[in-house]
Amino acid sequence: MEDGCDPDREQESPASGKQKESDRLKRIRHKIVIGSGKGGTGKSTISANLAVSLKRRGYTVGILDADITGPDIPKLLGIEDKRLTASSEGIEPADANGVRVVSMALLLESRDSAVVWRGPMKMAALKQFVFDVNWSDLDFLIVDLPPGTSDEPISVVQLLSGMDGAIVVTTPQDVALLDTRKAVNMFLMMNVRVLGIIENMSGFRCPNCGTVVNIFSRGGGERAAREIGVDFLGSLPLDPRIASMSDMGRAFVENSDAGEAFEKIVDRLLEKLSEKSSA
């Protein structure tokens, strides 16, 4: 352990610390947060697959799991047994087939360990995950926010300077759309660009007969986007292979009907980012 009272140790001033924090974020070209008004929309699954899709396209990608008490990203990417390490450059992300990952799950003693923390401890951890991680040079940092519109999502948004914007994930039923509007309005109130809404679990196609059954309704996400005045990035079907592949720690973009639909969503997202860059 380092001795904080060592007279020969060069003390870092608050100003130099802030400069170091700023320099880390400047090395990240695009920063995108993924949010939802409520849990259970598949936000973490969308975040993980967005990171994998971008990596498959040749981009350098990192993903920050900002859900301190319910971190799922390592499970979805198949790296539950890996751990974060430390170096002279700070916290070193874990590697998930080329995607750099930081998550509280990679610091816990076991998969069943609960993070029983009050707000201030969670805020301190989030600040470390943003500023003390050696993300290195990234084309994209994807941030999987905890659901809702309270402390944690607000704090992460405030910490991430130069953010490109937010994506809001919803399911089609009215109760989810009610919370989706709240999430969109939270980002707008914080002057964060809403890149668009993604509707998840939109219609189930029977693998035997091909009949489409709208278990959770359909089209609500697009309707909400139109009413609020933000873009609709696309919808994903309710595909059983998403759950099975996620349980195996594999991205559904690799092999599923939803994978093709998702790649079109990523195409639209990259077009929007390109439009912003050329504006």
Image (cartoon, rainbow, N blue to C red):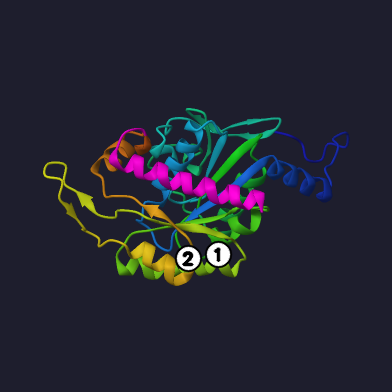
Question: Which mark is drawn over residue 187?
Answer: 1
Instruction: Say whether residue 19 is left or right of residue 207.
Output: right
Question: Could you tell me which secondary element the residue under label 1 belongs to?
Answer: helix
The N terminus: image quadrant: top right
Instruction: Determine the residue positioned at 26% across, 45% down.
Output: 239
**In the rendered structure, which segment of residues is drawn in magenta?**
254-279
Image vertical order of residue 223 relative to residue 242, above or below: below
Foreground residue among 156 and 267: 267
Question: Could you tell me which secondary element the residue under label 2 belongs to?
Answer: helix
Foreground residue among 152 and 163: 163
Query: Disc 2, disc 1: CB below 8 Å?
Result: yes
Instruction: Determine the residue positioned at 69% across, 39% down.
Output: 27
Q: Amino acid at mark 1?
A: Phe
Foreground residue among 75 and 106: 75
Instruction: Quickly name the residue at label 2.
Output: 183
- Do we see residue 135 in this rendering? no
Instruction: Please identify the dominant SS of the magenta region.
Output: helix
Q: Position of residue 61 (x, y in %)?
A: 55, 36
Residue 267 highlighted magenta (yes or no):
yes
